Image (cartoon, rainbow, N blue to C red):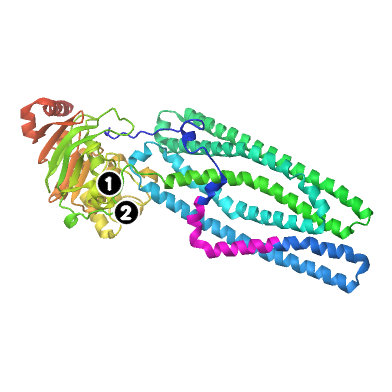
């Protein structure tokens, strides 16, 4: 047990916590993509140019058709040949423009979405743990993957199609009026009938789109949580309940998607039906004008093609409108992450650590409660000073505040009052990377990455040589078991180190800290998962490593801290005793009671 027990607040689905995030989902939210598009203005301009070209070519096709139709009876064969060649040339130009537009827009979409993913990840990887107490990691991953995938579809396809159809709509309307003002006026009578359902159903669609994205995010978070803890799930035969829980959330996501799809389908059928009903009516009027010689057959066909193009554009825009609204919701969710303020704020200009850090640590009347447990004081007025090169052990029952000291020293959180200094400088006056570079941490639950054993150790210092990595492994009593792996140090150890035992993971974590070679060493139950022989070897390595370094050790097993320069005894967020092992045993109290229990149990076990 650590003092900083991870607490996450699970989204309760749409209508609760997730709905508290901005409720307004307007297309204008897509303006937030502007800064990501700005570096690629030339590519964007070229794509828009290709788009305009294809739209203009599309609008010339009805003119060519009119020439051909009206010229069947009056034109010579040679002139007809020219008309058909011109029509073929227009088609070739249109194909080339369409291909260029597709290439540029798709490439631009991939580039922008890649930049957004990197920007969001860069922001999230630096957020303090307090942020992840309020949101599930799975939801963050859903936003980085699902929401950006939706944006990719919109940027590389929907926006381009929407702009092309908008140009065709506007150009087609102009050319319709030029061809026949009378028929154009009749067409415009149906416009209000088309706009009303778009506006009314669009609002409903916007809400449903956001709801659908929220359920997808919760589904992702649920799956992530279960799969990360898959061994625990299986050990407690919890596969069926976990699968049922995931299925329930997934079905709710599907139900939400069904409502969104149904709304879009209703909007599409209404809009397209109204548009083409109007076209049929206009065609009937036009046919009567042809019989009355008020217009030629070619003019009627030209007008009809323009009307179909305009009607098709309106129908396409009504469909794309829904996609743009979904993209708007996705954009807001991503921008929400990018604009999230970290409760542990970085100073604008951090102060440097003198001489790379001597290792003097001071807590001055520090009080702190975890954000999810504000009424529970993890530290209640702690003051302590640790001299450079001193080895200090923190002991006490679970929840007494020991690991919280590490959490605050690494500035994962800021104290509610008081201050913490390193070499006389307040941590809040330095960049986090500045003082963290002076620390090496071995956590109680070692983190092993899905990479080789060598790369896991090198994580402590990426520029370390292979020889330095192996020297650190020897010092951590890890060399023998690493050498025995199928590919030695280069063996892939699996996700979260599934191929390794708990003790092997811990020795790799210790080797990582040794390789970091930092002036401050933080050991949080660093030998708790080791057997007696490995523990003795690691303790010798840590004892050697601690020379000339400030070392803080959190331990429940008092045998591991007997040689510390000083022992601080924590209880209920306060330091209740201080001294060496022998002096604390002589004083009686909490430490003597813990020592008596542990050493008596140890003798009884032997």
Position of 259 compared to 466: left or right?
Answer: right
User: Considering only vertical position in the picture, is 22 above or below 51?
Assistant: above
Whichever of labels 1 and 2 marks the residue nearer the N terminus, that label is 2
Between 588 and 334, the one nearer to me in the picture: 334
Residue drawn at x 61%, y 36% is: 204
- Where is residue 390 drawn, in percent x and y? 12, 45
Between 380 and 569, the one nearer to me in the picture: 380
User: Considering only vertical position in the picture, is 335 above or below 294?
Assistant: above
Residue drawn at x 68%, y 66% is: 96
- Within 10 Å of disc 1 (Cα), the crowding (few <14, some 14-19, many 20+) is many
- Where is residue 235 drawn, in percent x and y? 40, 30
Q: Is residue 235 magenta?
A: no
The magenta segment is: 32-55
Q: Is residue 53 magenta?
A: yes
Position of 288 compared to 464: left or right?
Answer: right
**Residue marked by disc 1:** 509
Residue farthest bottom in this picture: 78
């Amino acid at each position: 047990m650590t003092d900083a027990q991870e607490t996450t607040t699970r989204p309760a689905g749409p209508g609760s916590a997730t709905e508290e995030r901005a409720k307004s989902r307007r297309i204008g939210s897509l303006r937030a993509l502007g800064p990501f598009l700005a570096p690629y203005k030339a590519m964007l301009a070229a794509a828009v140019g290709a788009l305009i070209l294809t739209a203009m070519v599309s609008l010339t096709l009805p003119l060519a058709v009119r020439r051909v139709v009206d010229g069947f009876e009056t034109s010579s064969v040679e002139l007809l040949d020219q008309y058909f060649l011109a029509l073929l040339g227009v088609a070739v130009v249109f194909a080339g423009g369409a291909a260029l537009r597709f290439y540029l827009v798709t490439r631009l979409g991939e580039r922008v979405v890649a930049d957004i993913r990197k920007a969001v990840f860069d922001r999230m990887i630096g957020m303090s743990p307090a942020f992840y107490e309020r949101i599930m990691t799975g939801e963050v991953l859903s936003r980085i993957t699902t929401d950006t995938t939706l944006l990719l579809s919109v940027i590389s396809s929907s926006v381009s199609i929407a702009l092309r159809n908008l140009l065709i709509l506007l150009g087609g309307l102009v050319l319709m009026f030029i061809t026949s003002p009378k028929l154009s006026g009749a067409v415009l009578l149906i416009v209000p009938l088309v706009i009303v359902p778009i506006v009314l159903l669009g609002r409903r669609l916007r809400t449903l789109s956001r709801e659908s994205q929220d359920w997808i995010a919760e589904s992702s978070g649920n799956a992530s949580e279960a799969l990360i803890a898959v061994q625990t799930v299986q050990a407690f035969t919890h596969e069926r309940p976990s699968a049922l829980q995931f299925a329930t959330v997934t079905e709710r996501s599907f139900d939400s998607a069904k409502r969104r799809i149904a709304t879009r389908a209703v909007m599409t059928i209404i809009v397209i039906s109204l548009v083409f009903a109007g076209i049929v009516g206009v065609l009937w009027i036009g046919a009567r004008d042809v019989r009355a010689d008020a217009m030629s057959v070619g003019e009627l066909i030209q007008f009809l093609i323009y009307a179909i193009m305009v009607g098709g554009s309106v129908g396409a825009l009504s469909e794309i409108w829904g996609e743009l609204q979904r993209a708007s919701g996705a954009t807001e969710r991503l921008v929400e992450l990018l604009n999230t303020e970290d409760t542990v704020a970085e100073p604008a200009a951090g102060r440097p650590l003198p001489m790379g850090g001597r290792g003097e640590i001071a807590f001055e009347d520090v009080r702190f409660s975890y954000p999810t447990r504000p009424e529970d004081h993890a530290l209640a007025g702690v003051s302590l000073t640790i001299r450079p090169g001193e080895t200090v052990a923190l002991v006490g029952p679970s929840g007494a505040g020991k690991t919280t000291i590490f959490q605050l020293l690494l500035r994962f959180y800021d104290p509610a009052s008081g201050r913490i200094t390193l070499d006389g400088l307040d941590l809040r006056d330095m960049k986090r990377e500045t003082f963290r570079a002076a620390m090496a941490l071995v956590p109680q639950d070692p983190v092993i990455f899905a990479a080789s054993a060598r790369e896991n150790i090198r994580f402590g210092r990426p520029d370390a040589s292979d020889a330095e990595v192996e020297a650190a492994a020897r010092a951590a009593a890890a060399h023998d078991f690493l050498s025995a792996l199928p590919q030695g140090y280069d063996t892939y150890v699996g996700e979260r180190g599934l191929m390794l035992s708990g003790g092997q993971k811990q020795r790799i974590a210790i080797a990582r800290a040794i390789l970091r070679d930092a002036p401050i060493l933080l050991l949080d139950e660093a030998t708790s998962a080791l057997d007696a022989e490995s523990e003795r070897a690691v303790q010798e390595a840590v004892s050697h490593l601690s020379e000339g370094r400030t070392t803080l050790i959190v331990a429940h097993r008092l045998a591991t801290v007997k040689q510390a320069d000083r022992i601080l005894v924590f209880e209920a967020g306060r330091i209740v005793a201080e001294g060496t092992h022998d002096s604390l045993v002589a004083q009686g109290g909490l430490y003597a009671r813990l020592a008596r229990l542990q050493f008596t149990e140890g003798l009884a076990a032997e």
